[in-house]
Amino acid sequence: MAATSVVVLDRGNNTTCTINLHGATVVSWRVNNQEQLFVSKQAVFDGKKPIRGGIPFVFPQFGPWTFGPQHGFARIVRWSLEKAPERLASGDVEAIFSIMDNDFTRSMWNYPFRLTYRLILREKELHFNIAVYNPSKDLTFSFNMLLHTYFKVPDVRRCQITGLHGCTFIDKTRENTVYQEGRDVVTIGEWTDRIYQNTPQEHIITNVVSGRKMRIQKYNFPDTVIWNPWIDHAKDMGDFGDDEYPNMVCVEAGHVSSPVILLPGTAFEASQILQVM
Ligand code: BG6
């Protein structure tokens, strides 16, 4: 069997979304043939390493983890295709992916769980609906979750990100010092790694591909992580080109600065909509 295999949602008009079952990583989203996501030229598709770019799925841990790999196991396991791509009456195309606990996940995180990930491709939008279910009768568990979206941009220095004014953020480039954002729009001109907390439901990124704007809407994801490795940290990553950092920005919707606590027999739901404006 191939190390990785992909599922394609095709909306027509050269509008497609490609999901690699390795991590259910969205590796391409084309709108009228224009790619919206950044994937490194040096990304590795060996069915083991996380894929460098697209939209890796971070769960059940964000960041370094004592019991397993950084950013959890969801981005490095093979997901099941629960429902193959199907055209809805609206013309939109939907597919559903899932994972549940197995010996590998139990070796790091000893809980039963079921995670479903539903993607719907619309003309200019990509919808993500996520549900985590705790089937246990008596065990409560807690987790982080985040969609680690790498947007493709012509020059990150010209992007502005709205919706962060007044939010507190943890600055991972300054020993996790907490600051408050004073700028109306956030721009990036250096190594940036910040967890903005209690952010509003909507962000807009300007000057993405074709000079357009990208709208991000999120529900039940209180945090927004902004990341760009810049030149020095790009060099530290074997699966990221030294000169690629101007062409990407990660704006990541998640539940990471506090954990989700999931009681037995209950479910957590969250969603995101990306829209080319
Ligand atoms: C970001 C984190 O979300 O992901 C960064 O805030 C991290 O600290 C980055 O460097 C990339 O992580 P990884 O594991 O994919 O190299």
Image (cartoon, grey):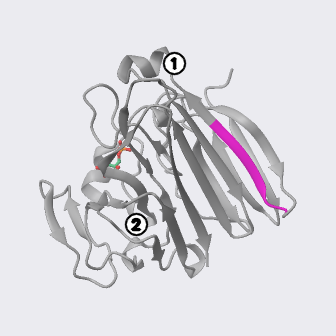
Image position of 121 with respect to 209: above or below: above
The residue at the point 52 percent across, 68 percent down is: 217
The residue at the point 36 percent across, 22 percent down is: 108
Residue 92 colored in magenta in the image: yes
Question: Left or right: 122 with respect to 194?
Answer: right
Q: Which residue is more in the foreground, 119 or 277?
A: 119
Q: Which residues are magenta?
A: 91-97
The residue at the point 25 percent across, 78 percent down is: 166
Helix, strand or loop under label 1: loop
Image position of 121 with respect to 186: above or below: above
Q: Earlier in the sequence, mark 2 or mark 1?
A: 1
Helix, strand or loop under label 2: helix
Q: Which residue is more in the foreground, 190 or 223?
A: 223
Q: Quadrant of the N terminus?
A: top right
Q: How many marks?
A: 2
In the picture as drawn, the residue positioned furthest to the bottom comes out as: 184
Image x and y of residue 116, in percent:
60, 39
Q: Which residue is more in the foreground, 2 or 76?
A: 76
For label 1, the crowd category at 10 Å Cα-Cα, with few meaning under 14, some 14 to 19 and many 20 or more, is few
In the picture as drawn, the residue positioned furthest to the top comes out as: 103
Q: In this figure, which residue is indicated by the disc labeled 1?
A: 102
Residue 244, located in which quarter of the rendered image? bottom left
Q: In this figure, which residue is indicated by the disc labeled 2?
A: 246
Instruction: Inspect the image, locate mark 1, and give the three-letter code of the amino acid beneath it.
Output: Asn
Instruction: Inspect the image, locate mark 2, and give the three-letter code of the amino acid beneath it.
Output: Pro
Cβ atoms at labels 2 and 1 below 8 Å apart: no
